[in-house]
Image (cartoon, coloured by chain):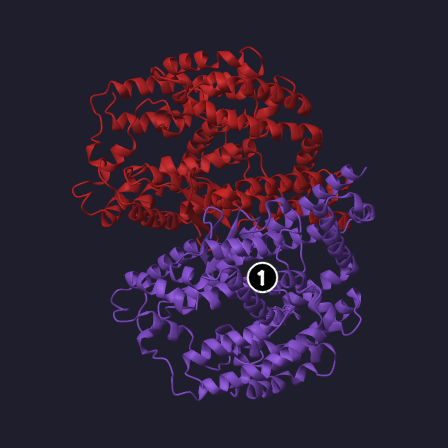
Chain colours: A purple, B red
Amino acid sequence: MIPENLMLLKERLGAVWDIRSAGAVLGWDQETYMPSKGAATRGQQLATLSALAHRLFTEPEIGGLLERLWEASDSLSPADAKLIEVARYDYQRAIKLPESFVEEFALEQSRSYEAWVKARTESDFAQFEPSLVKMLDLLRRKADYFGYEDTPYDALLEEYERGATTAAVRAVFKELAPRQSALAARIASSPHQPELSWLEQDWPEDKQWDFTMQVVRELGYDLDAGRQDRSIHPFTTSFGSQDVRITTRLNSRLLFSGMMGSIHECGHALYEQGYDPADARTMLLDGASLGIHESQSRMWENIIGRSLPFWKHYAPILREYFPKQLDGIGPEAIYRAINHVQPSFIRVEADECTYNLHIIMRFELEVDLIEGRMQAREVPEAWNAKMKEYLGIDVPDDAHGCLQDIHWAHGYMGYFPTYALGNLYASQIVEAMGKAIPDMWEQVEEGRFAHILGWLREHIHRHGRRKLAAELIRDVAGEPLNAEPYIRYLERKYGALYGLA
Amino acid sequence: MIPENLMLLKERLGAVWDIRSAGAVLGWDQETYMPSKGAATRGQQLATLSALAHRLFTEPEIGGLLERLWEASDSLSPADAKLIEVARYDYQRAIKLPESFVEEFALEQSRSYEAWVKARTESDFAQFEPSLVKMLDLLRRKADYFGYEDTPYDALLEEYERGATTAAVRAVFKELAPRQSALAARIASSPHQPELSWLEQDWPEDKQWDFTMQVVRELGYDLDAGRQDRSIHPFTTSFGSQDVRITTRLNSRLLFSGMMGSIHECGHALYEQGYDPADARTMLLDGASLGIHESQSRMWENIIGRSLPFWKHYAPILREYFPKQLDGIGPEAIYRAINHVQPSFIRVEADECTYNLHIIMRFELEVDLIEGRMQAREVPEAWNAKMKEYLGIDVPDDAHGCLQDIHWAHGYMGYFPTYALGNLYASQIVEAMGKAIPDMWEQVEEGRFAHILGWLREHIHRHGRRKLAAELIRDVAGEPLNAEPYIRYLERKYGALYGLA
């Protein structure tokens, strides 16, 4: 009976996976090539696929199969037992939400998104406030459906970072915030500021594109199992580990914006191309958590892609694409320019030193909102106060403040912290990798990334969702989540760049 | 009860339509942008979507709703009554095929396709023969499941051209074959052959692309509700009338191949963009039949796109794209070159005068095979004999003969005739349009296509699947399917071109 049940379950899970990944193809097309008038029909197609995947996954028959196989775990292979564990976890969460609630939530997401777009365009939080009130109510109800011990925010965080708790995140952020703030303040008053005027040139997009394609290929991105296209918001998506796509956005006035974005997405894509083929068409073919996923993108973009060895290799190559513009510009000039620290209003444009501060203040606001200690209408004031406290700058208006991100409009609370966790995990991972590959930075300087990628494949990528983030990090770094390596990395790198004592 | 049942039915049909059109998006991606390694996973996704659409459409609940609404047809609006009629027709055909047969058929399609690819590469029919034997058996069983009165071929033809019969097609083809053969023979012996040497130049693909885009836009293709991309085999696909896409294949040595292909696909696309939005997410949002669909592509490609007035307008424009290459080449030279008649082995490269002969011989072979009067192994000999009889040429090998088309490998028997029917319908339609728009050709010569497109929208496109092909043609042309207008068209056009008495 067990082999038959297992086969039947895998068949059912495979069909659900196929439908979800078909939805991902439609989503990719929507952001890249879909003609504008196709939007309404596409919305319906996506809604149908998503409802269908939910319905097929939550069928009681699947629940029955999972229980029977769960009880028989001992007689399963470790790989199959893990699949049952993760599938059962997903199943139990999925059935906790009544279908009527899922629909209500989806409906409010659309409404709230529209209100947010309008409010942001007019830079007027008051127009978005009623939607945020409703969304907070829905999110609290969602947390209630899922259940939690300590705070409803735990139940939301769990959605993106299984096993993480609000208390643990708070403790790490508490350590991080003052040190990042202090570092940013010392940098601001340093006399060693980078020379940036040479960036004010025209950088033709086709050359940027070609250089970017060369870089991602050389990092190890398999372009027979992936591709790069353009979109308004860069993203990575995949339909199995053999079809992993990234997008970029190029601007002829900005040399590094699209390029570093591509390297970021390439980091996500390398992770997804590295999943174990044995996990195909199951929920194990996924990242350990959003935080771990983000560690891969941020590691390639920031720790490697904004390092001096990387630019010692790529500066001469980039000069072949832009010989006139880069005449006399060497690796050090590029290295200094792309690591320019400048407290700013917009999270997605923030540098490494200030980025986490944007996240930490959002986390604090989210927890206060979900726990009911703050009302939606108080958001702009609280936002602006925190920007002043952490980054020392005065927010001019809501569009450059509390309305800048889409996440709350979409009901994604608990998501922001994973960006900062990604930075922390990335530093822990690179420290471990540096011990395993002592000449790692020499390899980067020679443009050799295969060993690094191979190490990541072995220790992170191939495990997919078989390990929780906490388990993975402990196995890789020999310790749990820890902010110290990231702070160490920042202080060393920026201390040298800005000549801090 | 009736309004509720109708709403419920439309909801169910809408979901099925969403899944099918999601499959179409995946199919488009597969042919345009999918990286090569994505193929295996894509096959599974498509199989899942297709099985799911079939399962959801054939649920007994839908059958029950259809029967109740069918009995209550008198109380429905004419539009709704038509939907019930067509949905019930599709439903009854769908449930006639057991799921096990559908799977067996799909499996054999894949196997047979692989055998065909190999056999064609090695130009060896014997390697494909066992697959053809199996496919013929499956097709006869399919015909048995569907049921028929006269010949099993009727049941297969019905799949592509609802309401057409083998006898009626045979009668029309019988009239057509000798007259097209005779015309081709007279042309071959004419001393007035076109000058083609100027075509032997380099025609950069980017210029071809730009010209093609200009033409399809000017014909009326809405590029906010569609787009053109490249693929190995040109095709049209749509996901609703607001997202209708075409593809083309360009070759820098061939000036007209890609361009005329684009106009052909654009003809299909104009049809699909012209469906009535009221039919959205139902099976009425489709062509009346494959023959009618093909009439639209062939009308734009051949009757309009290969006309002298069309080139009187576009020759100077094309010369702007290729000023050197087209120095001294006027509309007449182009007109003569693109209407060059030359019996040849490959159907898809055939000219207007010989094209139908390729179809007629395939039809005759298919009927003989399905009715068991011919065995699979006899195909090459019969093929070559018919090529000699109709086109007067000796087939050198199987790759240039009976292995050239994919249709039999896919089990698409009954499909070929619709290409020729498309030619006949197109001439009937254009004769009717010429009466309604007496200065039609002056409009073409001035590059004005809006009136023509408007007329097609009114009389053909907006009806979608609300009319059968026979009904539509009778309404448009005032007579049933008739080969005479097409023969008249050919004899007049090519008589003048080749100076035939």
**A35 to the left or right of A479:** left
**x and y percentages locating residue A201 in the rendered image:** 30, 72
Report helix, strand or loop for mark 1.
Answer: helix
**x and y percentages locating residue B232 in the rendered image:** 42, 38
A95 vs A423: above or below: above
Residue A349 or A464: which is nearer the viewer?
A464
Residue B404 or B437: which is nearer the viewer?
B404
A339 vs B468: above or below: below
Residue A474 or B294: which is nearer the viewer?
A474
Residue A126 or A459: which is nearer the viewer?
A459
Quarter containing the C terminus of chain A: bottom left
Give the residue number, with chain letter if any, for mark 1: A293
**x and y percentages locating residue A38 in the rendered image:** 53, 55
Rendered residue at 52%/19% (across/down): B366
A420 vs A343: above or below: above
Q: Amino acid at mark 1?
A: His
Quarter containing the N terminus of chain A: top right
Q: Chain of mark 1?
A: A
**B191 to the left or right of A315:** left
Q: Callout 1 environment at 10 Å: few (<14), some (14 to 19), or many (20+)?
A: many
Rendered residue at 41%/19% (across/down): B398
Location of residue B433 (image quadrant)? top left
Q: Is residue B358 visible?
A: yes
